[in-house]
Image (cartoon, helix red, strand yellow):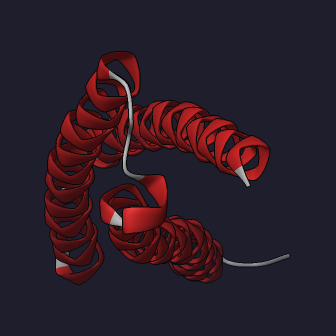
């Protein structure tokens, strides 16, 4: 039968193992959240390139509007692209701050406020989805506009 001291040592060892397992699990989860942040930043970086392309497309002489209505639509799209750039930039800054917070959580040995981090992560994830959805709708409208202009040019030829 184990002595009281041996039982105490077993409990102590078990506690150490449990703490290490919990820390490993938390670090692994934080690692996957960090990976998601990197994916978001990658998507936003690609949006930079797409927005530049769409701006060039709208400014291209091939797509110069020949009616007031088409001109107004073109201007509306350019304004909305500017707003999309601002939203994307704000979101990128938010993700960078979020990553810094994640890094601080991983480096600290004190009490962690992981629940705050998870809530913020979910909130940013929802904002990324909303921003991407709004952008995709805008891109679709711009492509439909371009198709309409191309069809008009084709009829004139």
Of 98 and 112, nearer the camera is: 98
* The N terminus, quarter of image: bottom right
Please state if 66 lies on the left or on the right of 16 as rendered: left
Instruction: Pinpoint residue 144: horizontal percent, then vertical percent.
Output: 66, 36
Of 156 and 27, nearer the camera is: 156
Please state if 70 lies on the left or on the right of 143 as rendered: left
Look at 77% across and 78% down and name the residue there: 2
Look at 22% across and 53% down and name the residue there: 85
Look at 37% across and 50% down and name the residue there: 64
Residue 59: quarter of image: bottom left
Residue 132 sits above or below residue 25 on the image: above
Residue 106: quarter of image: bottom left
Please state if 111 lies on the left or on the right of 118 as rendered: left
Residue that protrudes farthest toward the front in the picture: 157
* The C terminus, quarter of image: bottom right
Residue 47 sits above or below residue 109 on the image: above
Of 95 and 10, nearer the camera is: 95
């Amino acid at each position: 039968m184990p002595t009281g001291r041996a039982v105490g040592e077993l409990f102590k060892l078990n506690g150490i193992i449990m703490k290490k397992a919990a820390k490993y699990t938390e670090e692994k989860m934080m690692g996957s959240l960090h990976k998601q942040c990197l994916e978001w930043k990658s998507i936003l970086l690609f949006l930079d390139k797409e927005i530049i392309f769409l701006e060039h497309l709208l400014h291209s002489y091939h797509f110069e509007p020949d009616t007031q209505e088409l001109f107004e639509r073109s201007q509306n799209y350019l304004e909305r692209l500017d707003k999309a750039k601002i939203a994307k930039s704000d979101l990128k800054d938010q993700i960078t701050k979020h990553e810094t917070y994640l890094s601080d959580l991983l480096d600290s040995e004190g009490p962690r406020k992981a629940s705050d981090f998870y809530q913020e992560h979910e909130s940013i994830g929802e904002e990324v989805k909303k921003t991407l959805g709004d952008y995709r709708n805008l891109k679709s409208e711009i492509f439909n506009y371009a198709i309409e202009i191309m069809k008009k040019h084709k009829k004139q030829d």
